[in-house]
Image (spheres, rainbow, N blue to C red):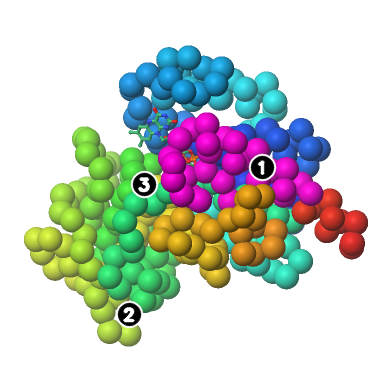
Amino acid sequence: MTRVDIAIIGSGSAGLEAALTAKNRNKSIQIFGIKDLSNKMQVIDHPITNYLGLSNVTGKQMAEAFTNQMHDAGIEITECKVTTVYAMGDYFALQLSNNEMVEAESVILASGVVAGKPYSGESEFLGRGVSYCATCDAPLYKGKDVIVIGGSKEEESEAEFLGEVCNSVKYIPLYKGEIAFKHDNIVVVNEKPVEIKGTMKANTLVTNQNEYSTDCVFVLRAAQFPTQLVPGLHVEGNAVKVDREMKTNIPGIFAAGDIVGLPYQFIKSAGEGNIAAISAAAYVDQKLRNR
Ligand SMILES: Cc1cc2nc3c(=O)[nH]c(=O)nc-3n(C[C@H](O)[C@H](O)[C@H](O)COP(=O)(O)OP(=O)(O)OC[C@H]3O[C@@H](n4cnc5c(N)ncnc54)[C@H](O)[C@@H]3O)c2cc1C
């Protein structure tokens, strides 16, 4: 398995700036995210007026400018979610939503902010009837009845995949808009999830209107809570705790952008991505010298 110097989780302004800077520092990188860069850029249609170098752009125009810059720098985004980062002692192993693993000397978390908190029962039943990864866990629920809580439009393809494998899928979108599935065993339920219940394993999803029996609840958010992504990470509320070098409490893991807290601004995220990459590059240099 190849091992990169720096794995970057997130393709918003924080992750992209981290990728550019790490590449300038001559480090091998892999950046994970989405082809549209960030859902936020896709929805902002008011003019963004405070990003240096780009005057009065919409979010989509900003995304286009960033995409061109990445192309010029030869940086490609790996379109895949990282589900968990494991500290392996001397390196990190990243579990991907396509079931592959990637190794990295260091990691930059730039996956944005997650609003709210986990559903009641979610953390308790994780791995026992609650899953964050359709590709990884679908085989366990072949022919069974599952529920998908979809945090963004991207999750619809995951639900389609589960529709191929499972007996039935209830899809609960946390966003607005038209949804049409190819598989007729997928039903859209427009209710608000409240609680996941069970005994030895999860078996019921409670919504604001009903209770549904299920074999598994797939909770597929656009971004995960930082402590679900990296076990053992220190947070304050939903924000990862960092110092001025964007170091977290775990040596070799850095964080930048909305994930580290207010203010939520593109330019602040990009600046922190720059610092995180410089710190990660220095960490990798030191580590390789000591090996
Ligand atoms: C409606 C709205 C209007 C705004 N207007 C402005 C404005 O005018 N000016 C301004 O400066 N700011 C504005 N903001 C704030 C700005 O959008 C954010 O500060 C900025 O997007 C943060 O960048 P980021 O890189 O930290 O995170 P994000 O842009 O949220 O990017 C996070 C990235 O991580 C990816 N990701 C998440 N989890 C994973 C995972 N597990 N694996 C792989 N990838 C993952 C996501 O797909 C995404 O690509 C606005 C925000 C909103 C919602």
How packed mark 2 is, by other alpha carbons closer than 10 Å (few <14, some 14-19, many 20 or more), is some
**226 over 19 or under it: above or below:** below
Residue 279 part of the magenta segment? yes
Numbered disc 2: secondary structure = loop
**Residue 185 visible, this orientation:** no
Q: Any mark on residue 238, and which?
A: none
Q: Name the front one of labels 3 and 1.
A: 1
Q: Circle 3: is it few (<14), some (14-19), or many (20+) Cα within 10 Å?
A: many
Left or right: residue 260 versus residue 6 is: left
Span of residues in magenta: 254-282
Q: Is residue 252 visible?
A: yes
Secondary structure at badge 1 equals helix
Rendered image: mark on residue 201: 2
Q: Position of residue 80 (x, y in %)?
A: 53, 46
Label 1 CB sits under 8 Å from any ligand 1 atom: no
Which residue shows up at 39% across the image and 29% down it? 42
Q: Identify the residue at image location x=43%, y=15%.
A: 56
Residue 77: percent from the left, percent from the top? 59, 36
